[in-house]
Image (tube, rainbow, N blue to C red):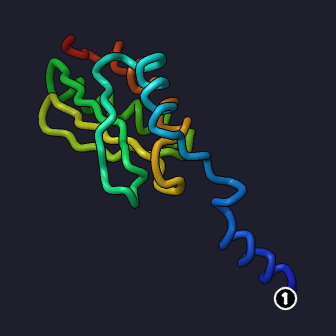
Amino acid sequence: LMSVYFWLIVAAMFRCKFLCAAQLTEAQAVKKCAETLSSQWKLSPVAPERGGFELHRTFEFQDFQSAFGFMSRVAIAADKMDHHPNWSNVYSTVDVKLWTHDAPGLTEKDFTLAAEMDKIAGGSGLVE
């Protein structure tokens, strides 16, 4: 039993080394942003301990109900991905910042979630 606890502790200490997504370089992130996401997504500089960059986008919807519905649908998708956005909502606006805390920095997970958010927003009363 003691050896089980030992290996659980070792696994927890080194989990990111083996399980966490790989951080993208700045060049990789710029390329992925241009090739896979809507033009409203931007790479924003952040503190080096957060990886140097995050994805940022502000979504504008027709009204509060549309914005909240979008957030609800994204919450379900994000939970399934086990990757949750940093976001805020004021009436019809949803401000989103994405980065992978475990990396730290941008990973494939951020771009996958951003693309899913673009898809969900398209059917949620998004103001173009």
Percent x, y for residue 84?
44, 46
Disc 1 marks a residue whose amino acid type is Met
Please give left or right for residue 51 compared with residue 112 in the image: left
- Which quadrant of the structure image shows residue 68? top left
Quick one: quadrant of the N terminus? bottom right
Percent x, y for residue 79?
51, 43
- Which quadrant of the structure image shows residue 80? top right
Percent x, y for residue 95?
23, 37
Please give left or right for residue 16 compared with residue 127 in the image: right
- Provide the secondary structure element on which disc 1 rests: helix
- Which quadrant of the structure image shows residue 14? bottom right
Residue sitting at 12 percent across and 34 percent down?
91
Asked whether the viewer can see residue 13, the reply is: yes
Residue sitting at 63 percent across and 60 percent down?
16
Estimate how packed mark 1 is, as few (under 14), some (14 to 19) or many (20 or more) residues with alpha carbons within 10 Å: few
Is 96 in front, or is 18? 18
Query: Which residue carries the number 1 mark?
Result: 2
Is 99 in front, or is 96? 99
Please give left or right for residue 62 compared with residue 73 in the image: left
Quick one: quadrant of the C terminus? top left
Asked whether the viewer can see residue 76, the reply is: no
Q: Work out whether 55 lies above or below 39.
A: below
Outermost residue, front side: 27
Percent x, y for residue 77?
49, 34
Total marks placed? 1
Q: Work out whether 35 lies above or below 49.
A: above
Residue sitting at 40 percent across and 60 percent down?
49
Residue sitting at 32 percent across and 41 percent down?
97
Q: Work out whether 106 lies above or below 103.
A: above
